[in-house]
Image (tube, rainbow, N blue to C red):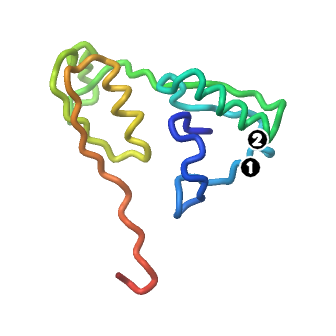
Amino acid sequence: MVNGMMPWGNRQLLPLGPLREPLTALKRADMVLVHHADLVLEHELKHIELMIREVKEALPIFFTGMVPSNFFKVGNVYTKIPLQAVYDALILCVSAIGFADAFVQGLEKIGPCYVDRLDFSDPPLISSQGY
């Protein structure tokens, strides 16, 4: 899986960067999913595809995106709220996921008049010296 919004990160593996494996790991892949493709410009997707083809030419590539279906009330996941409920509203997007930009941009596509955000990231790594 490749994040279409940040395909190769800073080209560094964890913990120095977001990559779990180097780009050359695509040689072992049977297919590639380019996620968040709906939030990326067409020419950027073509560039991502080109980079993948340089590693393994005949690799099937699929483009995916997240499409929300509804909201729900906190504490009651069975109460469905239509997406239109946030149209032209002020929204605070609270997230604790690995790549919150995609979450926020997806929410902005629904049509609120303003989206603010509060991102919680992973805790910083503690050094071997304990500080």
Q: In terms of secondary structure, where does tag 1 sit?
A: helix
Q: Amino acid at mark 1?
A: Ala
Q: What is the spatial separation of the Cα atoms under label 2 and label 1, in whole angstroms?
A: 7 Å
Instruction: Report x, y in % for residue 51.
Output: 71, 37
Q: In terms of secondary structure, where does tag 2 sit?
A: loop
* Res 99 quadrant in image: top left
Instruction: Report x, y in % for residue 20.
Output: 60, 54
| In this rendering, position of residue 17 left or right of residue 77 | right
Taking the spot 50% from the left edge, 22% from the top edge, the residue there is: 38
Where is mark 1, residue-wise?
25
Where is mark 2, residue-wise?
29
Instruction: Report x, y in % for residue 1.
Output: 62, 39
Q: Nearer the viewer, residue 112 or 83?
A: 112
Q: Nearer the viewer, residue 44 or 104?
A: 44
Marks 1 and 2: in contact by CB < 8 Å? Answer: yes
* Res 78 quadrant in image: top left
Taking the spot 30% from the left edge, 51% from the top edge, the residue there is: 120
Taking the spot 38% from the left edge, 22% from the top edge, the residue there is: 68
Instruction: Report x, y in % for residue 130.
Output: 38, 84
Q: Which mark is residue 7?
A: none
Total marks placed:
2
Quadrant occupied by the C terminus: bottom left
Crowding near the residue tagged with mark 1, few <14, some 14–19, many ≥20 C-alpha atoms within 10 Å: few
Crowding near the residue tagged with mark 2, few <14, some 14–19, many ≥20 C-alpha atoms within 10 Å: few
Q: Amino acid at mark 2?
A: Ala
